[in-house]
Image: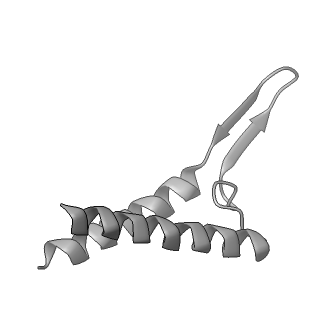
Amino acid sequence: MGRIIVLIGVGLVVLGIVVMLGERGGVRFGRLPGDIVMRGKHTTFYFPIVTCLLLSVVLTLISWFLGRR
Protein backbone atom coordinates (compact mmCIF):
# COMPACT_ATOMS: atom_id res chain seq x y z
CA MET A 1 0.00 0.00 0.00
CA GLY A 2 2.83 2.39 0.82
CA ARG A 3 4.51 1.76 -2.53
CA ILE A 4 1.32 2.72 -4.38
CA ILE A 5 0.99 5.96 -2.42
CA VAL A 6 4.62 6.85 -3.15
CA LEU A 7 4.13 6.14 -6.87
CA ILE A 8 1.01 8.31 -6.96
CA GLY A 9 2.96 11.11 -5.25
CA VAL A 10 5.83 10.85 -7.72
CA GLY A 11 3.34 10.85 -10.58
CA LEU A 12 1.71 14.03 -9.27
CA VAL A 13 5.10 15.73 -8.97
CA VAL A 14 5.96 14.78 -12.56
CA LEU A 15 2.55 16.00 -13.74
CA GLY A 16 3.09 19.30 -11.95
CA ILE A 17 6.47 19.77 -13.60
CA VAL A 18 4.98 19.04 -17.04
CA VAL A 19 2.20 21.57 -16.48
CA MET A 20 4.67 24.23 -15.30
CA LEU A 21 6.96 23.68 -18.29
CA GLY A 22 3.98 23.78 -20.64
CA GLU A 23 2.89 27.15 -19.28
CA ARG A 24 6.39 28.54 -19.80
CA GLY A 25 6.33 27.26 -23.38
CA GLY A 26 3.07 29.04 -24.13
CA VAL A 27 0.76 26.01 -23.93
CA ARG A 28 -1.60 26.25 -20.98
CA PHE A 29 -3.23 22.97 -20.02
CA GLY A 30 -6.97 23.49 -20.28
CA ARG A 31 -6.64 26.27 -22.85
CA LEU A 32 -5.37 24.35 -25.86
CA PRO A 33 -6.12 25.30 -29.47
CA GLY A 34 -9.37 23.63 -30.46
CA ASP A 35 -11.09 24.09 -27.11
CA ILE A 36 -14.53 25.65 -27.54
CA VAL A 37 -15.18 29.04 -25.93
CA MET A 38 -18.42 30.93 -26.58
CA ARG A 39 -18.80 34.35 -24.95
CA GLY A 40 -22.12 36.12 -24.71
CA LYS A 41 -23.15 39.38 -23.11
CA HIS A 42 -23.48 37.97 -19.61
CA THR A 43 -22.27 34.38 -19.89
CA THR A 44 -19.32 32.34 -21.04
CA PHE A 45 -19.50 28.71 -22.14
CA TYR A 46 -16.22 26.79 -22.14
CA PHE A 47 -15.81 23.20 -23.31
CA PRO A 48 -12.21 21.91 -23.38
CA ILE A 49 -12.70 19.18 -26.02
CA VAL A 50 -9.04 18.98 -27.11
CA THR A 51 -7.92 18.89 -23.50
CA CYS A 52 -10.37 16.05 -22.82
CA LEU A 53 -9.11 14.07 -25.81
CA LEU A 54 -5.47 14.56 -24.82
CA LEU A 55 -6.18 13.55 -21.23
CA SER A 56 -8.07 10.48 -22.42
CA VAL A 57 -5.15 9.35 -24.59
CA VAL A 58 -2.64 9.85 -21.77
CA LEU A 59 -4.76 7.97 -19.21
CA THR A 60 -5.41 5.16 -21.71
CA LEU A 61 -1.68 4.75 -22.32
CA ILE A 62 -0.94 4.76 -18.58
CA SER A 63 -3.59 2.11 -17.87
CA TRP A 64 -2.35 0.03 -20.82
CA PHE A 65 1.25 0.10 -19.54
CA LEU A 66 0.16 -0.73 -15.98
CA GLY A 67 -2.09 -3.56 -17.18
CA ARG A 68 0.72 -5.31 -19.03
CA ARG A 69 2.41 -6.47 -15.82
Quadrant assignment, res 31? bottom right
Which residue does the image show at 74% across and 68% down from the upper left?
23
Instruction: Give the residue at the far top of this rendering.
Output: 42
53 relative position to 28: left or right: left
Image vertical order of residue 25 relative to residue 35, above or below: below
Image vertical order of residue 13 relative to residue 49, above or below: below
Which residue does the image show at 84% across and 20% down from the upper left?
42
Asked which colour scheme the image uses, the reply is one colour
Q: Which of 48 and 28 is in front in this view?
A: 28
Which residue does the image show at 50% across and 54% down from the upper left?
52
Q: Where is residue 65 in the image (x, y as percent from the top left)?
A: 24, 77
Q: Where is residue 48 in the image (x, y as percent from the top left)?
A: 60, 48
Image vertical order of residue 33 relative to residue 65, above or below: above
42 relative position to 4: left or right: right
Count numbered badges in the picture.
0
Which residue does the image show at 67% across and 61% down from the upper left?
32
Q: Where is residue 60 in the image (x, y as percent from the top left)?
A: 31, 66
Q: In which quarter of the image is the C terminus?
A: bottom left
